[in-house]
Image: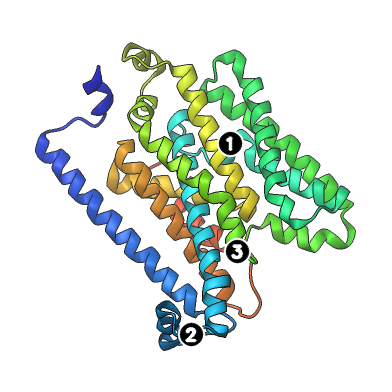
Amino acid sequence: MSKALDSPATGAPGAISLGRTLFVVWSVGLIVAILGVGALAMVSGSVPLSSHQFFDVLSGRDGGMASILVLELRLPRFLVGILVGASLGIAGQLMQTVTRNPLASPGITGVVAGASMAVIMAQVAWQVDATWLPFIGMLGGAGAATLTFLLAARSGFSPLMLALAGMAVTALASALVTAFLLFSGAQAQQLYTWLAGGLQGRGWSHAGQILPWALAGLGLSLATARWLNLMHLEDSVARSLGGTVTWLRLGFVTLAVALTAAAVAVAGPVGFIGLVAPHLVRLVAGVDQRTTLPLVALVGALLVTLSDLLARTLTAPQELPLGLFTALIGAPLFIALIRSKIL
């Protein structure tokens, strides 16, 4: 039984060793790429910094404007981008595995639409302070996901019913968003910008809001990776190997919902990350969740931080929506995957 759970991708010891070597190589490569994007993010923008100024900030020799730009504005924003990308990547991996649907994304449970609906309603109806929006978004996402769970419960949370229930909840929430936008008046432009996703103005408080969710999500998903591997199998086969399929599916979907709600509450409905990142990783890492999950988190972090860097530098000092660049990067990658018949 233990072997069945721990070795989903069977193979000779040499093949397993090669897999670990590739995992280390790809992990190091992705971390280096993220750090490279981070270095560019620290010195680029409407007020560019030289490499000399940047190293002075790192060494503590510069306590002036450069230090404020790096330590108070750009660094926390970059860290929020890492956490948002990692959370959405893991959530996408969980949803695609649990539903056995390569087109599944973190929003399949209605959590993205629910979070967006809650934020838009709060802004239009009550004009709440911006500091409350992350909490309101998480409540809206959790509420939409709960409704999806209730609709899918009678079928034992089968992949098909989860997808159909999520589509219904998403359609309802999207309709309400449209209705509230029609009555938003002068707020419309600001709300449309939020709906495009972005990290503008995100600071240390936002990093603190999403950090526990991202760390807990990654930790729990890695700790239960051997059980997540069972979700690749048909339900009858998974039950014969000792898996309580209904509860496992519910647990993993709940974890994906929590990660998605936290990311959307902080950055808005950022698209394509949870859809594309798992596919890119499976090209090199296979389906073993113990190696796939960390790489998906790194790829998601890289896609979001790179998109954010482009969003705030290409037309500086004007800033473009983050969602525009995640779509511009993610959509061509997804089309390439389709054309290569990988999906």
Closest to the observer, 239 or 76: 76
Q: Quadrant of residue 191?
A: bottom right
Disc nearer the start of the sequence (3/2): 2
The residue sitting at 37% across, 37% down in the picture is 222
The residue mark sitting in front, 2 or 1, is 2
Query: Residue 188: percent from the left, percent from the top?
Result: 82, 59
Q: For this rendering, which residue is in front, 230 or 43? A: 43
Dot in front, 1 or 3: 3
Crowding near the residue tagged with mark 2, few <14, some 14–19, many ≥20 C-alpha atoms within 10 Å? some
Label 3 sits on a secondary structure element that is: loop
Residue 36 image position (x, y, % from top left): 38, 70
Foreground of the two, 261 or 288: 261
The dot on residue 203 is: 3
Residue drawn at (61%, 21%) of the image = 152
Q: What residue type is labelled 3?
A: Gly
Q: How far apart are marks 1 and 3 (CA)?
A: 29 Å
Q: What residue type is labelled 1?
A: Ile
Assign a secondary structure to mark 2. loop
Q: Which residue matches tag 1?
A: 108
Image spot of residue 50 (x, y percent) = 45, 87
Q: Which amino acid does label 2 sit on?
A: Asp
Q: Residues within 10 Å of mark 1 (few under 14, many from 20)?
A: many
Q: Mark 2 points at which residue?
A: 62
| In the image: residue 319, left or right of residue 229 | right
Callout 1 secondary element:
helix
Category of crowding for the residue at label 3, using alpha-carbon neighbours closer than 10 angstroms: few (below 14), some (14–19), many (at least 20): some
